Image (cartoon, rainbow, N blue to C red):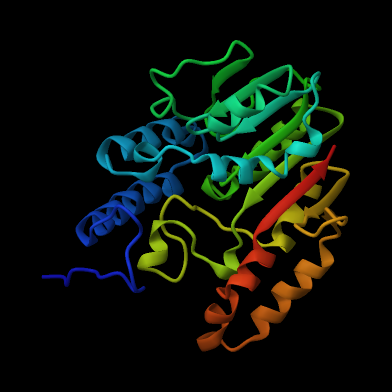
Amino acid sequence: MDAIKKPNVNGLPQGYTEEQLLQHYEIEKELAGKLLRAPFLERRVLYSSLYDELFKRVTWHPQLQKKVSGRNLLKQMQPLQPYLKPDSVLLEIGAGDCALSFAAAKQVKKVYALDVSDVITQHKQFPENVELILSDGVSVPLPENSVDIAYSNQLMEHLHPEDALKQLSNIQSVLKPGGIYICITPNRISGPHDISRYFDDIASGFHLKEYTFEDMKKIFREAGFNRVAAITKIPFFPISPLFPYILLEKWIRAIQRPWRKSVARQWFIQRLLYIRILAVK
């Protein structure tokens, strides 16, 4: 009989028992494996159905149990705030519970909230200028050149590695010339960042691929974006070239393996490594 797998870190995430953590991990790893092994056409259906299945089987999932606090929502809004105008059209990719879409709707003309599942948003009252759009995980069913700002937070890492470029190209297509895409995603070097962080050294849950700044520069360029930069938290210096972050990644990779992860997970290093991309069409 196989030994019961135990978390490899101290402490449990808030709201979890050890049994719930293991169950969530096993379910998510099982479903992620199905998605990774699925051929292209089958994935078009699986993105939606597997997330629906996850939320139905893991009823204690944080996205179902927690409401976004005002503080967290304000934090998510910060990168967007300078670009929100009364005549703007905003596209949120991976809108989840739509808390950010609802908040941004007060400042813009129109918000499209794109997701693969409507389980979280069922029974919610939508503002008149917010429209929920269901996707197969890759398509962006909007007219070309119709969106001023695209935004995603914790979305890129959930895409099948073969689908990421396709989705990015579709986002680039719906943006107006000069439109921007703000993309926030955890860095692989300090990961994993999904439920598997409590058990594995490499993401094996619904983070199908975690990225680095170097990866992001390459894939955004391939998708046709004209400029790719990093969003900083430095006053009076909000945008930075990517090369300092890429150099930091190379330095951490050069550290011997037993110490590499502990260095990468120092709070100030994690803060620098966390990927916040501003890409311009």
Q: Residue furthest left?
A: 1
Q: Say which of 271 and 151 sits in front.
A: 271
Quadrant of residue 190 within the rendered picture: bottom right
Q: Position of residue 126 (x, y in %)?
A: 52, 16
On screen, residue 181 versus residue 58, left or right, reads: right
Count up the numbered dots: 0
Q: Position of residue 123 (x, y in %)?
A: 38, 17
**What's the residue at 75%, 57% (across, down)?**
233
On screen, residue 205 versus residue 60, left or right, reads: right
**What's the residue at 44%, 28% (across, down)?**
117
Quadrant of residue 13 within the rendered picture: bottom left
Q: Position of residue 208 (x, y in %)?
A: 50, 52
Residue 40's place in the image compared with 75, above or below, is above
On screen, residue 160 versus residue 279, left or right, reads: left
Residue 121's place in the image compared with 56, above or below, is above
Q: Residue furthest top?
A: 128
